[in-house]
Every structure is written in structure tokens, then in C-alpha cells.
Image (spheres, helix red, strand yellow):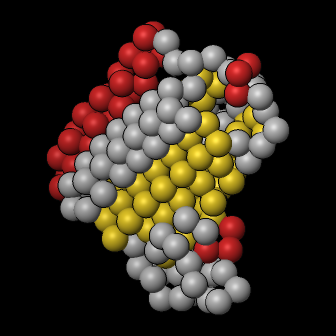
């Protein structure tokens, strides 16, 4: 469902992207080329700051927002998801938040008030709250990172994790094409 927010902003969705009919895209959302938005995902840009303003939620080209993902933002803060990035099933990305290019966010993970550099991998059930990760960091499953986390204790992405991230992105890019072809059959 594509809908306006109370401020009257309507999502901008590139024609080459696929948004499942059960997903909700609301407000000041920009979805770039060849993005896959899966079933029951919610991307909602509707809160404003003290001045009545809001920054957009931007989903970069060739990214995928999988089933049940929620992307929202507090008080109109920006949320940016880079290109070729995968946000896996039931994850929450709550702004302010900036996620770089070629990033993988695992199942049920939570991101809030953080930045993740290019090529980062956050595995399943992890929490990144107030942390700022440079490119190429690997967050193991069930890890909790905060603003005071010593990044010297966080490993770097290895070749196997990077290949997995690329495979997930590639698979979901193929799904965009397949589902776009099926749209005319319903």
C-alpha cells in the first residue's frame, strides 16, 4: 500500500523497483532503481521535528528490504540505506540511521541512531544502538553494540561473509525482475 503521510508527502518509487502488495510505503520515502521490498515490510516517514520538517527515508538502488522489515524515524530524522544493501527478514532500522553500500543486516537485527560504513555485516539478532562503524566491520549474531563499544574488539568482514552478502543482494535483484513480470498476471 502506497500512501501519503499527514504532511501530504507521497513516496517516490522508481518504476523498475518491486514493492509487494502487502508492504506499506508511507510518506517522504524515496525508493531508487531495482529495489525489492518484500511482503509485510513497512517503510514509514511521517514524524516531523520541532520545526515541522522531516528528512526522507532513502532506499538506494539494487537494495532489498525483506519480509516484515520496519524502517521508521524519530522526529523526522534521516534514514539512508545505501546501494546493494540487504535488510533481512523482520529487522528494524530506526532513524536517525545511515547504512552504507553493500551492507548486510541479518534477521531480527535492530539498528538505531547509528552509522554503518560500506561493506559492514551485522548478523542475526544483533543490536547496533548509537554506534558508528567504519567500513568493513563484522558484527556477530546476538552482539549488542553501543556508543561506548570498543571497536578494537569487533572483527572485520572476511571473504566468506562478503560473498554471502553479495549472493543475497544478487538473489533479491533477480527477484525484482521475476516479480515485475508477474505483476501483469494478477
Taking 115 as reference, is 118 above or below it? above
Q: Whole-percent x and y of residue 65? A: 46, 45
Residue occupying the far right of the picture: 148
Q: Quadrant of the C terminus?
A: bottom left
Residue at the spot 22% in from the left edge and 39% down from the top edge? 178
Q: Whole-percent x and y of residue 146? A: 78, 40
Residue at the spot 51% in from the left edge and 46% down from the top edge? 99
Q: Is residue 72 left or right of residue 144?
A: left
Q: Whole-percent x and y of residue 1? A: 44, 67
Is residue 70 visible in the rendered image? The answer is no
Is residue 5 visible in the rendered image? The answer is yes
The residue nearer to you, when weighing 127 against 135, is: 135
Taking 2 as reference, is 145 above or below it? above
The residue nearer to you, when weighing 159 against 174, is: 159
Q: Is residue 111 left or right of residue 149?
A: left
Q: Quadrant of residue 2?
A: bottom left
Residue at the spot 35% in from the left edge and 22% down from the top edge? 167
Q: Whole-percent x and y of residue 122? A: 60, 29
Q: Is residue 8 left or right of residue 139?
A: left
Amino acid at each position: 500500500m502506497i500512501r501519503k503521510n499527514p504532511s501530504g508527502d507521497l513516496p517516490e518509487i522508481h518504476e523498475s523497483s518491486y514493492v509487494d502488495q502487502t508492504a506499506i510505503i508511507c510518506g517522504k520515502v524515496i525508493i531508487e532503481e531495482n529495489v525489492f521490498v518484500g511482503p509485510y515490510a513497512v517503510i514509514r516517514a511521517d514524524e516531523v521535528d520541532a520545526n515541522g520538517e522531516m528528512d526522507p527515508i532513502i532506499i538506494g538502488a539494487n537494495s532489498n528490504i525483506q519480509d516484515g522489515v520496519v524502517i521508521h524515524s524519530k522526529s523526522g530524522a534521516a534514514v539512508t540505506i545505501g546501494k546493494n544493501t540487504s535488510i533481512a527478514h523482520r529487522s528494524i532500522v530506526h532513524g536517525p540511521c545511515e547504512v552504507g553500500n553493500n551492507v548486510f543486516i541479518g534477521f531480527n537485527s535492530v539498528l538505531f541512531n547509528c552509522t554503518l560504513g560500506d561493506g559492514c555485516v551485522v548478523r542475526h539478532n544483533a543490536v547496533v544502538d548509537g554506534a558508528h562503524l567504519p567500513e568493513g566491520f563484522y558484527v556477530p549474531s546476538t552482539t549488542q553494540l553501543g556508543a561506548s563499544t570498543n571497536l578494537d574488539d569487533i572483527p572485520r568482514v572476511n571473504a566468506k561473509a562478503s560473498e554471502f552478502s553479495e549472493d543475497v543482494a544478487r538473489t533479491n535483484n533477480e527477484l525484482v525482475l521475476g516479480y515485475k513480470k508477474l505483476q501483469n498476471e494478477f
